[in-house]
Amino acid sequence: MNMVRVLERTGADVRYDAKQTCCGQPAFNTGYHDESRDMALHFLDIFDGDGSDYIVAPSGSCVTMVKVFYGSLLELPEEYREKAERVRSRVHEFTSFLVDVLGKNSVGAEFHGRVTVHDSCHALRELRIREQPRLLLRNVKGLELVEMDAADVCCGFGGTFAVKHASVSTAMTEEKVESILRSGADVVTGVDSSCLMNISGMLKRRGSAVRCMHIADILGGSGS
Amino acid sequence: MTSRTPIIPQNLKLLVEERIHDDGLRGNIRRATHTSLGKRAAVVEDFPRWEEMRTTAHDIKKHVMDNLAHYLELFERQATEAGAQVHFARDAKEASSIVCGLAREHGERVIVKSKSMATEEIHLNPALQQSGLRVLETDLGEYIVQLAEEPPSHITAPALHKSRGEIGRLFSEQLGIPYTDDPEELTAIARRVLREEFLQADVGISGVNFGLAESGTICIVENEGNARLSTTLPKVHIAVMGIEKLLPDAESLGLFLNMLGRSATGQRITCYTSLITGPKRSTEPDGPEQLHIVLLDNGRSTMHADPKLREALYCIRCGACMNICPVYQKVGGHGYGSVYSGPIGSVVTPVFMGEQAAHDLPFASSLCGACADICPVRIDIHHHLLDWRHRMVEGQDGPLLERIAMRLFTFTALSALRFDLAGRLARLFAPFLKHSAGGMRLPVWSETREFPNLPEKSFKQLWKEDRERS
Ligand code: SF4
């Protein structure tokens, strides 16, 4: 709900269609295009022509699926190509929407703590989102932004990769966690919940006090 | 000492497990890849328009691949004109038998080789040995892995996985010399051994970095001078060249030399750049009497015919995608069980080894895309991995359980009602999976990480409540 709060604070009229489910990314990533396509068509049917100007999601990964993979790497039937084109241009990742579309560098938030950003791979390399979350965080009252080393290196999640190649994935997450701990931050944030869930899973296992928070929870949360 | 462990397709997980917990190995790989990456970053800064150069390099490669027949014919004509003998090899076996035939014909004492991945690809060394020939790797890294009877673990730095200490012990055991781990001393020792052999050799075998169609020239880059010796001292020089190595002309070579040296080792230019057009001419005092160029297909025309995979042929084998790959950094080249490792290796190996044998490779990636971002010729490597995953699943139906899970998830996600219900059920049953530290217990995942408890309410419920309040 925190994303909704932030968006409403900017004056946006936020709607939510309860018919929506999943963009199809998990199946697509694992190679199951037929299954993924079914979900993509469901997604396009719901969002195309729904009367809203923009579609905003708090996930670089889901946005990548729609914006980059629909109709390119995931082939769509002829009659859905135009739909996909229209939806693609309307869909935005949350921080990119605030900064690039609305032109806002600050959303009047307050948060007390030392925060570091993990760059999620899809957001960073498919959507080129890097500065947007940092810009917003720098303008949060009370927040101290610190950079970890190798912020742009993958956390090792990668969907089914984390299970199929668990030991490699774990080794990658270990390095990420060490970077975070070295940074001295007490909160690590980012634009994708899945990476944060992965990182948080290891921080907790290690008994670390460092918390993982989605950026929407910092920008729209209670302040600590 | 000259036999090499042949690469057999193996269970990928097993290969990985054997390596992932080896802290020494991981340290070696980490140090080496990070050194290369650091140097690369520094010299790339020389060019404010590096990104545009990558695009140009991509476009040139695309142009050559889109006109491959033309450039191949031109290259063959010009090379023949210059006195070289050009051979075509359809597959690894044919290539290896051509080279072995030539080597048997001309080689009696020793065959010297300079670093070449194409000859690894066709498993040339074992074949030469079976023909009763003695073959010696002359690139220091290749020499090291040959002594260790291992395949190279990196396409530009074959012994990258070894520490100085390990190399010192290897030299001491294999050459019967006192132990030292001083890099300069070790290099000097290798050089002494190799120089002797160079003078004995009657055949030199090399790879090719670039083939210039316009003039039939082959270009070889290196840092130790061993390739130059291998291609000039023996009376016969055999060069094995993948058909994708072509460039139109010397003008485009300038750009590619910059891209290759900088991306591979962070060098502005490699120490030696040899341009070879034909064998020794009658007016020249030295050089090989014969130059044979073996043009290698081995699956490349299959890639070429595939509109998606064609891009994989743009690769100039710089190894930058391996250096930056977090998976490669953890398991090293031998963890892939294929001649070409790392991200691009997982794209081309299904063609070279067959989809069955390479089935797991495209899945051994978190798809982070760092490879595509560093690639000097802008190959969308991780997107090719995604594409392979699809082909593998389509061709082999994927693991049964996974297939059922995907179907079930799709069935659920195609209706908001079912999706909702599934969410409710999950929340209902989640407490039974509770783990002591306050998270859920999941197979595999929970061995190294906690899994969060599901939130008590779905977004849908929260949204509904919120709207009812206001
Ligand atoms: S794919 Fe690109 S980065 Fe990797 S080796 Fe080839 S040229 Fe280099």
Image: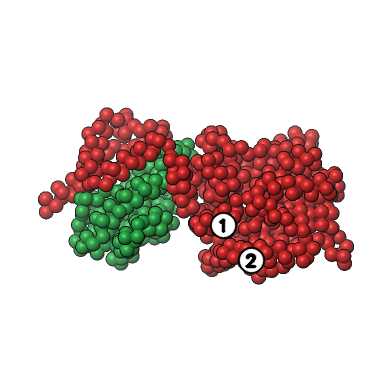
Chain colours: A green, B red
Quadrant hosting residue B304: bottom right
User: Which residue is located at x 76 percent, y 42 percent?
Assistant: B128
**What amino acid is at disc 1?**
His
Residue B157, numbered label: none
Q: Nearer the viewer, residue B295 or B19?
A: B295
Closer to the camera in the image, A207 or B197: B197
Vertical placement of A54 versus A65: above or below?
A: below
**Residue drawn at 85 percent across, 44 percent down:** B109
Report the residue marked by disc 1: B304
- Which quadrant would residue B217 be assigned to in this image? bottom right
Disc 1 secondary structure class: helix
Residue at image point 83% right, 62% down? B280
Q: Which residue is mark 2?
A: B70
Asked if residue B305 shows in the view, the reply is: yes
- Measuring from the top left, give residue A46's x and y in whole percent: 24, 55
| Residue B38 image position (x, y, % from top left) | 57, 54
Say which element carries label 2: helix
Circle 1 marks a residue in which chain? Answer: B
Q: Residue at x 61, y 37 (%)?
A: B8
Binning the other alpha carbons within 10 Å of mark 1 as few (below 14), some (14 to 19) or many (20 upward) gives: some
